[in-house]
Amino acid sequence: MKKQSHRFCCWMIAFSLFISAALTHAQASPALNSDAVRGHVGFAQDTLANDWRLMQVQDVEDGLAAYPNIKFTVTDGEGSVALQAQQIRELAKTVDVLITSPRTEEVLSDIIRDVHARGTPVILLSRGIQGEDYTSFVYGQNEEIGRQAGEFIADTLKGEGSVLMLQGVLGASVTSERTSGFMAVMAHYPDLQVVTRVANYLRADSIRAVSDLLNRAIEFDAIFAQSDSMAEGARMALAQAGIDPASLPTVGIDYIKAAQDALLNGQQALSFTYPTGGKEGAELAVRLLRGEPVPRNVEIPFMSVTPANAADVEPIF
């Protein structure tokens, strides 16, 4: 019995030494040691005036926070294609990895293509470019979201009436895809008219657009806002005009806290979750700095949120 106990103790000691050695190796491994990851990551953001875009930057920064030797630089394009183009060019000269969410495809595709061709890895967050001259693309299923929004509104209005579509930034891939999916459904309902206004994913622009329509007595029976910030702006404009926002079915995208509140109090009918992709972008940047391969495309799943499940679904921020 003592002999078996002695053997068991020896085995436990050997096992402990093996585990200790493995942990020491893991801690010393550059691939697992955050201090060993070094480099400069730059994010050329379209605008920081939009709360979703600001949160996207914050999510990248949070994802890189565990790596003290990664420098992170952010630029604010202020909603200007020309300024963002300049900032992309300048950042590309100094960073090891460039992250960007291009305001428009048409103008910025050539610039990003040139940066990528010169050897700088490019991560596209949420918005794409023409062609495939990038390293990795983190995106959502925008066309499918637009299609589901269209089907919901068509069913709600029973195929008749007028819909106000508040579009985001024209020329951005996200806007084009959401519009395409929505309009593909509308094409099957000849008695559904679509009134379109551009509100650039901003509350203030949405307030102005909806107020202008109301002042001109242009009627609509439902609202499809391509972001929940614009949906919130639409509700504000309706309330200012003495119209109960709950009287119009409203669909938004992103599922921020304001959308959750509106769903729970009956002022919004539907939203779709649309995470920023910042966490995924940070993970891709770290892998690139480590010299690891990264996936070409990273698709972020979404879900629909209604008044029935809003209390159980955490807003993206």
Image: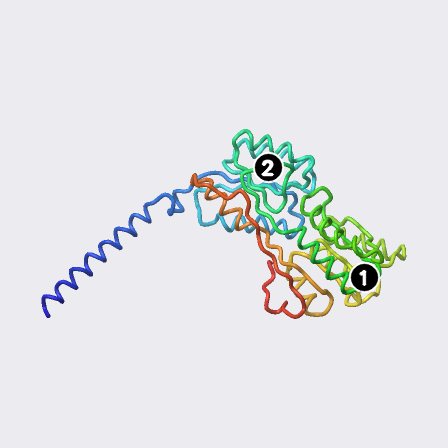
* Residue 96 higher or lower than 51, as above or below: above
Task: Count residues near mark 2 (Cα–Cα under 10 Å), then give few for <14, some for 14-19, many for 20+.
Answer: few
* Residue 210 higher or lower than 311, as above or below: above
Name the amino acid, label 2: Glu
Residue matched to label 2: 132
Left or right of 60: which side holds 110?
Answer: right
Tell me, for residue 42, which label it has, or none: none
Q: At 54% from the left edge and 31% from the top edge, which residue is drawn? A: 93
Left or right of 111: which side holds 193?
Answer: right
Where does the image place residue 128, in percent across and percent down from the top left? 63, 42
* Residue 176 higher or lower than 189, as above or below: above
Where does the image place residue 73, in percent across and percent down from the top left? 54, 41
Left or right of 3: which side holds 92?
Answer: right
Q: Are marks 1 and 2 in contact (CB under 8 Å)?
A: no
Q: At 54% from the left edge and 29% from the top edge, which residue is drawn? A: 118
Which corner quadrant holds the C terminus? bottom right
> In the image, which is nearer the foreground, mark 1 or mark 2?
1
Name the amino acid, label 1: Gly
Q: At 49% from the left edge and 38% from the top edge, which residue is drawn? A: 40
Tell me, for residue 159, which label it has, or none: 1
Where does the image place residue 61, in percent across and percent down from the top left? 52, 48
Q: Earlier in the sequence, mark 1 or mark 2?
A: 2
Which corner quadrant holds the N terminus? bottom left
